[in-house]
Image (spheres, rainbow, N blue to C red):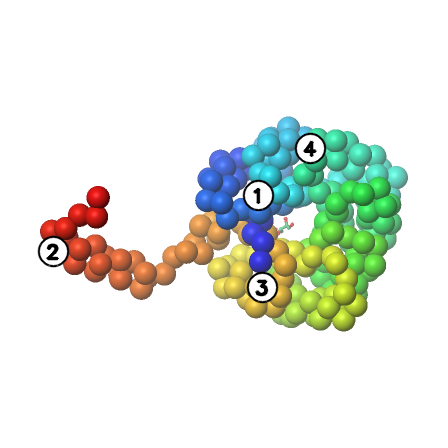
Amino acid sequence: MKFFVDTAEIDDIKELNATGLLDGVTTNPSLIAKSGRDFKEVVKEICGIVNGPVSAEVASTEYNVMLEEADVLSRIAENVVIKLPLTWDGLKACKTLTGKGLKTNVTLCFSPNQALLAAKVGATYISPFIGRLDDINTDGMQLVEDIRQIYDNYAFATEILAASLRTVNQVSDAALAGADVATIPPAIIKKLADHPLTDKGLAAFVADWKKTGQSIL
Ligand code: E4P
């Protein structure tokens, strides 16, 4: 499963990119607003740091304007992926942009039918929002399982990008459900390696190694 980081914070992106574990970045208008940065500038900076796909979302809800915005965004860097909302206008724009050879990420997906439509218009990625479904007492991870089955039934190439992940367990659950990609907030990625038994075991090994009085170097 590929790891994308879900943020527009440059320091976090640099730190995670240095681990070699980062495959891409997703942003959205809320994350851009939170960063306080100019949208196009920050996308350009992110694309210069990370080699992988960087999702940048259109602001318009109208097909024609979405295409104009996509044109501007796609010129920022080769690794820009155009993020489009799962609406009829967004789907139409996805079809047009796919025809032009651009990569797309159809976002705000909350049902298997929506994911089916996105695959049929050739989306590169579909983003089911797990956490927001869990927020309303619906099983978000079941949606990933359903999309996996539908896409496998018809050999759709659209990649499932599990989004709106808020816990470490959701990351492993998304992997078990067959998501191709997980986009994860920086704080959650940083917790993935943590385990109290690892810390305890390492403390014992360090102490025992000291007792040997040896040095490897
Ligand atoms: C994905 O592309 C979105 O940016 C993100 O995962 C939304 O997460 P949230 O529901 O925590 O805002």
The residue indicated by pointer 2 is 211
The residue labelled by disc 4 is 77
Q: Disc 1 to disc 4, how far (Cα)? A: 18 Å
Query: Within 10 angstroms of label 2, few (less than 14), some, or many (20 or more) residues?
Result: few
State the residue position of label 3: 174
- Dot 2 falls on a residue whose secondary structure is helix
Badge 1 density bin: few <14, some 14–19, many ≥20, Cα 10 Å:
many
Residue visible at 83% across and 59% down in the picture: 120
Q: Nearer the viewer, mark 1 or mark 4?
A: 4
From the image, state whether disc 2 or disc 3 is nearer to you: 2
Nearer-N-terminus badge (2/3): 3
Whether residues under marks 3 and 4 lie with C-beta atoms below 8 angstroms apart, the answer is: no
* Closer to the eye: label 4 or 2: 2
Kindly tell me whether mark 4's CB lies below 8 Å from ligand 1.
Answer: no
Dot 4 or dot 2, earlier in sequence: 4
Left/right of residue 84 with respect to residue 130 in the rendered view: right
Residue 173 placement: quadrant? bottom right
The residue carrying mark 1 has its beta carbon less than 8 Å from ligand 1: no
Q: CA distance from mark 2 to mark 3?
A: 43 Å
Give the mark nearer the N terminus: 3 vs 4.
4
Residue 98 in the figure: left or right of residue 126:
right
Q: Nearer the viewer, mark 3 or mark 4?
A: 4
Q: Residue at x 71, y 66 (%)?
A: 147
User: Residue 47: horizontal and vertical position, in percent?
Assistant: 62, 35
Q: Amino acid at mark 1?
A: Thr
Q: Nearer the viewer, residue 82 or 37?
A: 82
Q: Amino acid at mark 4?
A: Ala
Which callout, 3 or 1, points at the residue further toward the start of the chain? 1
What percent of the width, then of the height, locates residue 73?
Answer: 74, 34
Identify residue for label 1: 7
Q: Secondary structure at mark 3?
A: helix
Measured from the top left, where is residue 76 in percent x and y? 70, 31
